[in-house]
Image (cartoon, helix red, strand yellow):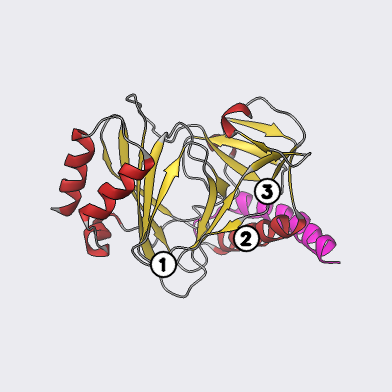
């Protein structure tokens, strides 16, 4: 009933802002129990977290993400999304980034589509979620979420735009510091995206050493999970083992 109320409010609203969406989500009083039909705690190891669509309303979509201990998204934006909100039902790690030029000036991510070199991610703003907290999403948001606790939890995601679209978050950007690229994808914002999920790459990405080290370690942990998963093919294991070796060398070099 509460999800239906949320859907109805979103259908009736127009010209929404992130602040208005946050208020609507809070007013809906959603609970973990409301989201359990879409829980995906047994998601494939290749998926950095569980991801299921609850409702597509033309100009908005509602999704449920499932986070088991150790699950982290890659650093990402939200594609064509213009407004949204995320409610987390656990103590999630949450880091917010900006895209800068090498001179340190902030750059509007909407203007960075065609760059080839000279962009770096800022030092992150640490903005953790407490259970039940709602945060706004706007078009320029670049962030990362994850579960560093020992308890699984769910999160509710509402994304929208002014015009109808099949994929509200389509062409989202994944910031891959191992490749030093920005990958465009229409699916989950996962570490180690398969080639068939990458629309294109843009080269020239960098970050501070602390950020690079953190992302390398998270990618390493995800690769190990994928390699150990029974559904992973021999060919995939061989490819990922080579990637893991290079990644481990880079981690050791940064640590030295």
Camera-nearest residue between 66 and 118: 118
**What segment carries the magenta color?**
230-256
Q: Secondary structure at mark 2?
A: helix
Decide: is 192 above or below 93.
above
Which is more N-terminal, label 2 or label 3? 3
Quadrant location of residue 193? top right
Q: Which residue is mark 1?
A: 130
For mark 1, does the 10 Å Cα neighbourhood hold few (<14), some (14 to 19), or many (20 or more) residues?
some
Decide: is 250 above or below 151.
above
| Residue 241 on image: x %, y % | 70, 57
Q: Which residue is mark 2?
A: 218
Residue 197: in magenta span = no
For the point 59% across and 34% down, the residue is 109
How far apart are the two marked residues, 2 and 1, measured between alpha carbons? 22 Å
Q: Secondary structure at mark 3?
A: loop
Which is more N-terminal, label 1 or label 2? 1
Q: Which residue is mark 3?
A: 122
| Residue 147 on image: x %, y % | 49, 65
For the point 46% across and 64% down, the residue is 92
Which is more N-terminal, label 3 or label 1? 3
State which mark lies toward you, 3 or 2: 3
Q: Residue furthest bottom?
A: 150
Residue 253: in magenta span = yes
Q: Secondary structure at mark 1?
A: loop
């Amino acid at each position: 009933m509460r999800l239906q109320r949320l859907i109805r409010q979103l259908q009736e609203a127009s010209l929404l802002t992130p602040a208005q969406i946050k208020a609507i989500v809070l007013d809906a009083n959603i609970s973990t129990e409301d989201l359990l039909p879409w829980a995906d705690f047994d998601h494939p190891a290749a998926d950095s977290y569980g991801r299921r669509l609850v409702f597509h309303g033309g100009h908005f979509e509602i999704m449920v993400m499932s986070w088991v201990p150790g699950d982290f998204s890659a650093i990402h934006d939200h594609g064509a999304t213009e407004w949204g909100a995320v409610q987390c039902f656990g103590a999630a790690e949450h880091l917010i980034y900006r895209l800068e030029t090498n001179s340190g000036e902030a750059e509007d991510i909407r203007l960075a589509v065609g760059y080839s070199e000279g962009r770096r991610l800022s030092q992150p703003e640490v903005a953790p979620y407490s259970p039940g907290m709602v945060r706004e999403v706007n078009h320029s948001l670049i962030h990362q979420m994850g579960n560093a606790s020992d308890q699984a939890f769910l999160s509710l995601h509402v994304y929208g735009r002014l015009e109808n679209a099949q994929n509200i978050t389509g062409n989202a950007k994944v910031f891959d510091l191992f490749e030093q690229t920005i990958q465009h994808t229409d699916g989950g914002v996962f570490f180690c995206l398969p080639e068939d999920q990458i629309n294109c790459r843009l080269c020239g990405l960098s970050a501070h050493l602390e950020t690079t080290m953190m992302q390398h370690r998270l990618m390493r942990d995800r690769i190990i999970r994928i390699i150990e998963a029974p559904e992973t093919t021999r060919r995939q294991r061989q490819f990922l083992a080579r990637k893991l070796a290079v990644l481990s060398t880079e981690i050791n070099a940064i640590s030295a």
